[in-house]
Image (tube, rainbow, N blue to C red):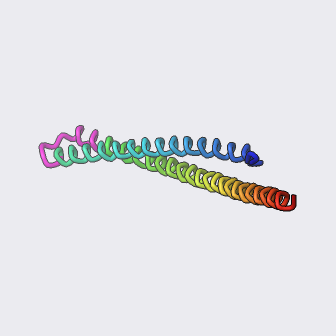
């Protein structure tokens, strides 16, 4: 029996390497997205703390300078939250781009693996047919002798 050699194995190997690279890039994009999202959550928490402090100051003794500081802090946090929302959106968009690229590479790899499997099945069938022919020739040769 002969040895099976897939003629496009080098292409399949490249597809596997590209898929691995795309998985790493997707993982990195996911990590960046989660980091940006955590930063956003922290900003929301800080804003909530300042809003509570502002309400306490407004309900207690009125210290205008502290109230103004609280309002400025809340305002700057709102601005930071808007900026961070844009960062989260960019990271989310990048994550989606990497996801699509990874899915495409996975499809290509699976296609090449299916081709390889089909070629291997054809090879096995051909080997079996050749073996059957050899057996038939041996049987007819022995029978005719």
> In front here: 36 or 84?
36
Q: Residue at x 24, y 38 (%)?
A: 65
User: Residue 23, image x and y in percent?
Assistant: 55, 45
Q: Is residue 59 magenta?
A: yes
Give, as a single range, the part of the protein colored magenta: 58-71
Q: Is residue 90 left or right of residue 116?
A: left
> Residue 86 versus residue 57: which sits nearer the camera?
86
Most common SS among magenta residues: helix
Seen as rendered, the residue at the extreme left is: 60
Q: Would residue 105 be counted in the magenta stretch?
A: no
Q: In percent of the image, x 35 and y 46: which residue is there? A: 41
Q: Quarter holding the C terminus?
A: bottom right
**Which residue is more in the foreground, 75 or 92?**
92
Q: Residue 18 location in percent, x, y?
A: 64, 44
Left or right of residue 44: residue 54: left
Q: Position of residue 55 (x, y in %)?
A: 19, 48
Q: What residue sits 54% from the left and 45% below the top?
A: 26
């Amino acid at each position: 029996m002969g040895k099976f050699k897939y003629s496009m194995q080098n292409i399949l190997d490249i597809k596997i390497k590209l898929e691995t690279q795309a998985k790493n890039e997707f993982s990195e994009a996911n990590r960046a997205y989660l980091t940006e999202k955590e930063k956003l959550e922290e900003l929301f928490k800080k804003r909530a703390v300042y809003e509570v402090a502002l309400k306490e100051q407004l309900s207690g003794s009125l210290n205008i300078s502290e109230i103004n500081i609280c309002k400025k802090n809340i305002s700057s946090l709102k601005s930071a939250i808007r900026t961070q929302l844009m960062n989260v959106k960019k990271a989310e968009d990048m994550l989606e781009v990497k996801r699509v690229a990874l899915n495409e590479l996975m499809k290509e790899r699976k296609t090449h693996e299916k081709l390889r499997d089909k070629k291997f099945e054809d090879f096995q069938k051909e080997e079996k047919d050749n073996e059957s022919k050899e057996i038939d020739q041996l049987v007819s040769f022995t029978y005719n002798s």
